[in-house]
Image: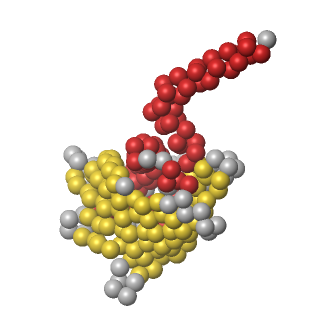
Amino acid sequence: MDLSHSFTVPTSVAATWEHFQDIGALAECFPGAQVTSVGADDDGAPTFEGTCKVKLGPIALVYAGSGRFVERDEAAHRFVVDAKGRDKRGNGTAGAKVTVTMAPAGDDATQVDVLTDLAITGKPAQFGRGVMQDVSDKLLGQFVGCLEQRLSAEADGPAAEAEPEAPTDAAAAGTDPEPAAAAPTPAAAPRPASPRPVAAADDDALDLGAAVLPVLIKSYGKRIAIGLAVVLGLAALLRRRRR
């Protein structure tokens, strides 16, 4: 199935492109994902290996797999990543070919378009394309929020060094100025730490069930309510007949 997304980040195209080449940093912003190693293939294309933890109700899936950059055009700010993984307990597979394109969006901002060709088997495959699109939209919102924090922090950078003070009239004339009492040195302000994604209190796995449930209620809430009313009505009728 094909899934499409688009979002904007508050940094230049060059800075955004550079950040997206760091697969390990990107994985830290995606729930449940962890990059375990980064390398290159025989053609010099970047490769990576990692895992992704997924919870689907009481079922816990741990996909282990690898990926590589099959295309990378820095001039056009476009790259394609092909990734594949398999659940460690044999509960299914997942594969994705992700095409990312970047373009300027106003002053010091970048629009990122993401097209994902997703192929899954096993338990998560029971959800149709519409549900998977809505769920991926929700997950992407979390990813983009984390990414925006990181890019904004990098764009701000350390505070510029203070300019040297202009010489006093006495110094310009070559005379020694009157000695002044030394002022106490102010304590340096603590440097803010780089923002990090908020980890779950007890588990860092991607809770797909929690993401799917609100989507199902939104999409099929009326049908569920009608079905529940019918069931309750039949149950009441059976109770009356038994009496």
Q: Quadrant of residue 102?
A: bottom left
Nearer to the camera, 85 or 141: 85
Looking at the image, which is closer to me, 234 or 142?
Answer: 234
Is residue 229 something one can see in this rendering? yes
Q: Is residue 72 left or right of residue 180?
A: left
Most extreme residue toward the right is: 243
**At 58% across and 45% down in the image, what residue appears?**
209
Which x, y percent locates residue 182? 55, 50
On screen, residue 238 above or below 96? above
**142 lies above or below 62:** above
Residue shown at 51% from the left, 71% from the top: 65
Q: Is residue 165 above or below residue 89?
A: above
Asked which quadrant contains residue 241, the reply is top right
Residue 54 on image: x %, y % = 58, 55
Residue at (52% x, 42% y) in the render = 212
Name the residue: 35% across, 73% down: 69
Observer-nearest of 16 and 172: 16
Quadrant that contains the C terminus: top right
> Seen in the image, is 91 located left or right of residue 39?
right
State the scheme by which the image is colored.
secondary structure
Q: Position of residue 159 (x, y in %)?
A: 41, 53
Instruction: Tell me if 235 is positioned left or right of 126 in this view.
Output: right
Would you say residue 25 is visible in this rendering? no
Residue 85 locus on image (x, y percent): 50, 68
Which quarter shows the N terminus?
A: bottom left
The residue positioned farthest toward the bottom in the image shown? 42
